[in-house]
Amino acid sequence: MSNPDNTSSLTPASNASTSTEADDTPASISRRRLLSTAVASGSALVMTSLAKHAQASDPLPIPQWTKTLGEPVLERPYGLPSPFEKDVIRRETLAADMPGGYDFPTPYSYWSTTPLQDLHGTITPNGLFYERHHAGVPIVDPAQHRLVLHGLVKREIVFTMEDLRRFPSVSKFHFLECSGNGDMVTEGKFGKNVADIHGLLSCAQWTGVMLSTLLEEAGVDKEKARYVLAEGADNAAMLRTVPFQRAMDECMVVYAQNGERLRPEQGYPIRLLVPGCEGNINIKWLRRLEVTDTPAFSREETSKYSDLTGPDGLAHKSTLVMEAKSVITFPSGGQELPEAGFYEIRGIAWSGRGKITGVDVSMDGGKNWHPAKLSEPVLSKCLTEFTLPWRWDKTASVLMSRATDETGYIQPFIEQLFKARGKYFIYHNNGIQPWLVDSDGSVTYG
């Protein structure tokens, strides 16, 4: 069995064959000139299109909503999106409707996906944050909820919510991703859009207290401690093992998300946050932390969330880190380009090992790669937006993106992953995602 915090054996032996050409090569200089031309001409192309529309009708008629009073203040005490955005919602995976798709016997052990293709920037609104539950969503009374910290500590402590909020608070931006994100592809089921394939991914600003602060308060035995067992208060009593050093370095006990208290489906009133690691270990409705010298080997670490690799399908004891990954969100599956001309390719990239340092984009199925622009801010273990100008001439094109993180890891093709991990590989799919833009402008899985 491997080290519980080690994923090196699951990564391709080499990504050298997919590395980007040096910036000062003639080919690279030529590409930069082409892209500069696209940027310069892009505004002119867009303005020409707008001018055609303006000539066809009154350029700026007075609409009905300008002629009447709007809604009064506090018409909705909790703000809601415009009714014109009613289709931007979480949905169940469409894989259930596909041949050979999943069969869901119960709505309690289930998931919903974030509509990444409809969002902008890198922060996911709380109401669109993906869900994955194993026994439904408990409604927890914060006044009665308790968090116990025990095990290899000098004094066991039972925290109330008020106790936790009295500790020094921290706020950090991090993504959460289910280890099963993308498993449709590894199982040969290809979704219709980004949400189908990558929708078990979201990003937020999290506020809470560092787990190390609580461990120090309890007088943790640093000589003997090797793991922290985290347990949830849901009906599944979700239990996962966190390596002690990771718990001390960056884990948080969070009670707020994007400026408001956690939603019930995100673990209200408190959850564990383990930045960069698979979603299931970020225990929701957190009720117990036990410091130990042995792993839990819980149900979720043996019967599920175990990576089967190699020719014999041996299970790794624990593979936690979500490797560098990216996806183009526009143009992407289910969308359509109405006409030839200038477009901006947009997407997101992320890595559980740190910051994204670069994203390359290909418009010809991986034969040639062009460096995309990373939008600020670029934060560690957080979604990063990238863009690239593109002039489409109605030629069928296969769009791809590949991310590189600060460790030098380069996002691989899925064929590389199968070669490195074996035929039993399902979880932790960070393979390059292709989108086919057909000559009619329709976009499907590539």
Image: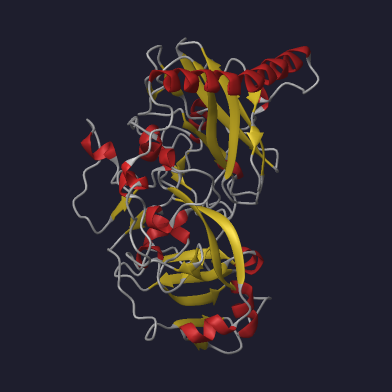
Give left or right: position of 356 versus 401: right
In the rendered image, the vertical position of residue 387 relative to residue 40, given as above or below = below
Q: 87 and 24: which one is in front?
A: 87
Give left or right: position of 182 versus 392: left
**Residue plotted at (30% across, 66% down):** 137
**Residue plotted at (37% across, 61% down):** 299
**Residue plotted at (35% across, 50% down):** 82
Task: Where is residue 400? Give x, y as percent.
Answer: 52, 25
Quadrant in which residue 16 is drawn = top right
Q: Is residue 251 visible?
A: yes
**Residue plotted at (43% across, 29% down):** 332
Q: Extreme right residue here?
A: 24
Task: Where is residue 442? Give x, y as percent.
Answer: 37, 20
In the rendered image, the vertical position of residue 346 relative to residue 256, given as above or below = above
In the rendered image, the vertical position of residue 426 relative to residue 253, given as above or below = above
* Quadrant in which the C terminus is drawn: top left
Q: Is residue 369 visible?
A: no
Q: 421 and 21: which one is in front?
A: 21
